[in-house]
Image (spheres, helix red, strand yellow):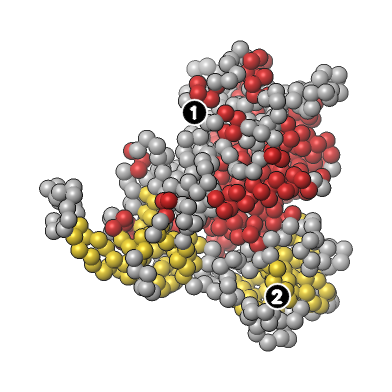
Amino acid sequence: MRHDEKGFTAASLDQARITGGFWEAWQRTNREVTIPYVLDKCDETGRTQSLRLEWTSDADWQPHQFYDSDLAKALEAASYSLHQYPDAALAERVREYIRLLGRAQQPDGYLNTYYTQTGIEKRWTNLRDMHELYCAGHLFEAAVAHFRATGERSLLDIAVRYADHIDARFGPAETKAPDGTPKEPGYPGHEEIELALVKLADATGERRYLELARFFVDARGHEPHYFRVEAERRGEPSDRWQWERGYHLGEFAYYQAHEPVRDQTAAEGHSVRACYLFAGMVDVAVSTGDERLLDSCRTLFTNIATRRMYVTGGVGSHSHGERFTVDYDLPNESAYAETCAAIALVFFASRLVNAELDGRYADVMERALYNGVLGGLSLSGDRFFYANPLAFHPTAPMLPHVRSDAERQPWYGCACCPPNIVRLIASLPGYLYSVNDRTVAVHLYAESSLEVRTDALSGTLTQQTAYPWDGEVTFTWQADSPAAFTLALRIPQWADDYRIVLPESAEAGTDAASPAGTRLERGYLSVERTWNPGDEVRLTLPMRVRRTRSNAAVRQDGWRVALERGPLVYCAEEVDNGPQLATLALPADAAIAAEHRSDLLGGCTVLRGDAVRSVVGPYGSETDDAPLYTEAGRRERVAFTAVPYALRNNRGTGEMRVWMAEL
Ligand SMILES: [Zn+2]
């Protein structure tokens, strides 16, 4: 494999599937619990009623400007699930929502139940705040997923009519709609439609949608700012709106519209919007061969990955504006790190992986997936975190600047996260593998299979592993006849002493003496050879416990370590370690052992060792008459247990902490 090869395509749900192990359990819960649960919640909370256009002014619910997106994401998730697990009842339920969508669609293609019920004459008057284009994007993504899953065009046709409506209305100011009206040079306040239009262009072959996506990407940040223009048209102040909404958002940066995207070098503003935009930018860059735009994406990714991302892959450190702040500002207890933002980062990173095979993108994708994303969902599949702080104390929800919940919630008024995590888990097989003409690339390790059907290659690659608990991964190639191709296996940045056993070769390590026909480059080990049916490759990734340190510029993490093993970040919980986790420290020389516990949290590997507890005062810490300050104190050795951060808060609420002091 040459790493300058472009054009990897993510495996489709026709090709890749998860067949067992860690992710199979999550997919099963997703299918059996979470998807129907999220659809039920849409039915119970006004979202489906809104789709039925049932709102009246005396109703006990209100249409909301992004209700449509929640249901669309749930339909997208259901479609991914139907793609791999046929379910007649779910398929019919989805068809019923599609019938309602068809009924709610206006004769000119417009489809937004908020404006249809509250005053359609106001539609398209506030792109900055009202999420119409965002909702449209989610509808397009659902439509493409449903079309690919079922071959049915019902939802795709609705999406095409709506996309044509949008395409006729928005575009460069000098262009005109088919009826001769000049187009509006507007773009969304909440990005998402960009990546969705590229998907729609792909599914329909209609290049106009790709051009519209490129327009939305490039229109932002230019004078005159469209958000200002439309505010003036509404008779609102055009300059001070961000103050009036109670936000100090730094002007257009909140919307990534402070400068043209090609000039942006740091991830700014609302983190979900930013990462959706960046994902769409990669799509546009790859689809149009725009190297300059791709280079901006690389720069923005580097800014996030080296300065603005938690060890969990969470991004958007501040709840105020749900936004990126400044380099190295990564507070733990007040971290926002919205589940959707980690999901959006997975989208961004996975697109870069496909654009140019490079492990630094896949490392971030895996980090976010296993920690920042998965921690948003309970083991039971029906409780959700919105914010994902890296330290929690029961007093946190009482603090005005912290938006943590003490435990995962059954639903949110702003319910963007639950259906988002559902669609990612249902579509996860597509993130494991990519293929091009001569290379099969493996990005994530999970028990799974990949059907490879290209002009040059036909066969099935199976992957057997107990990852992330165990680092042994066995690949088997099954085909009718020998075939020459390159298998590119991601070697995570932490896997410094991986081992690989190839067919008909001795075991070899990572030093320069890699086995003949292999090459480690940019985080991928390429095995280039003629593969015979039944050939096996065994990869062993070192699952040692790692003490990870932050860059010295992260002031919140001085003298602290985060424990990691494989792709998982660990945390201490009160249920295992008692309260006042801040008084615990890990001795630098103390061993920390991994122990698999099949009886705990659905079966997981915990970390155990000794810690030192600082006991303050002669009184104990809980008595009412203990002084607030004292010189008295001592240290005592205590047992210490850490569990995967993603599995936190499944045994009741209590203190939690990722970054531990080290002595
Ligand atoms: Zn969210």
Residue 374 lies, in percent from the top left, at 52, 54
Could you tell me if residue 490 is visible in this image?
Answer: yes
Q: Where is residue 291 in the image (x, y as percent from the top left)?
A: 78, 48
**Residue 426 at least partly seen:** no
Q: Nearer the viewer, mark 2 or mark 1?
A: 1
* Relative height, residue 82 to residue 100 (above, below): below
Image quadrant in which the N terminus is located: bottom right
Residue reaching furthest top? 235
In the displayed structure, would residue 440 be above or below residue 132?
below
Can you give x and y, in whole percent of width and height, for residue 342 in the image?
Answer: 56, 48
Residue 247's label in the rendered image is 1
Closest to the observer, 574 or 361: 361
Front residue of 97 and 145:
145
Q: Residue at x 13, y 56 (%)?
A: 619
- Of the 4 image quadrants, the one containing the C terminus is bottom left
SS class, disc 2: strand
Q: Residues within 10 Å of mark 1 (few under 14, many from 20)?
A: few
Amino acid identity at mark 1? Tyr
The residue lying at 80 percent from left, 71 percent from top is 485
Task: Report the residue at 63% width, 63% height from top.
Answer: 444
At 79% across and 77% down in the image, what residue appears?
A: 529
- Report whether 117 appears left or right of 204: left
Residue 286, disc: none
Name the kind of residue labelled 2 in the image: Thr
Residue 365: x %, y % from top left: 61, 56
- Judged from the image, the secondary structure of the residue bearing numbered disc 1 is loop
Circle nearer the N terminus (2, 1): 1
Question: According to the image, label 2 marks what residue?
Answer: 476
